[in-house]
Amino acid sequence: MASKSIFSVTVLLLFLAVGSNAGGIAVYWGQNGNEGTLAETCASGNYKFVNIAFLSSFGNGQTPSINLAGHCDPSTNEYTKLSPEIKSCQAKGIKVILSIGGAAGSYSLASSDNARQVATYLWNNFLGGHSSSRPLGDAVLDGVDFDIEGGD
């Protein structure tokens, strides 16, 4: 009888592990010019989540800005070239997430109203909302990662 119980528990645990969507490796992409393109990162098959890093300036009256190190020149708005790469990653089942903050960012939230303004900006410019100036083009990201290492 004891072996039957152990077998049942083992089968149950195996079923739960196989049916689980938990886990998967995440990577921060965008801060190392030698890391390859976003499309190459997703095509590697190594990751379930890719955090585009970083929206490094936001809040407290600042114009939000992205810093992707050597990948894009912010003065030419070439971040929109990432839209097809983001969609390619998502077509592979990889969640693409915007990481905000970072160690070298300039960010803070001065009030609850300011936090709502930033949230509205994130929704309209990176998630399911609408804006005529979406920094990453028409790609809709899967979420936001808060990498708050400094600021208020």
Image: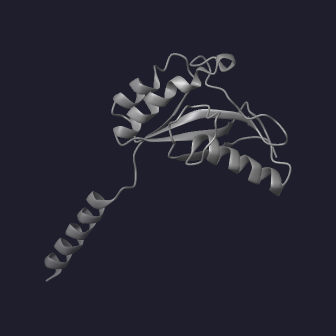
Q: Residue at x 67, y 20 (%)?
A: 74
Quarter of the image that includes the N terminus: bottom left
Examine the image and state in which quarter residue 66 appears: top right
Residue at 81% across / 57% down in the picture?
A: 112
Which of these two is toward me, 44 or 11? 44
- Count of numbered tags: 0
Write the residue at 57% across / 31% down: 136
Left or right of 20 on screen, residue 117:
right
Q: Position of residue 39 (x, y in %)?
A: 41, 26
Q: Is residue 57 above or below residue 20?
A: above
Residue 112 visible at all: yes
Residue at the extreme bottom of the image, as rendered: 1
Q: Is residue 44 left or right of residue 98?
A: left
Please identify the residue farthest to the front as the structure is shown. Answer: 132
Whether residue 54 is situated above or below residue 142 in the rendered picture: above
The quarter of the displayed image where residue 151 is located: top right
Instruction: Inspect this view and state whether residue 146 appears.
Output: no
Depicted 61 relative to depicted 66: above or below: below
Relative image position of residue 8 (x, y in whole percent): 19, 74
Residue 61 spot, x, y in % from top left: 85, 40
Q: Residue at x 80, y 43 (%)?
A: 108
| Front-lying residue, 65 or 46 | 65
- Describe the colour scheme in one phrase: one colour
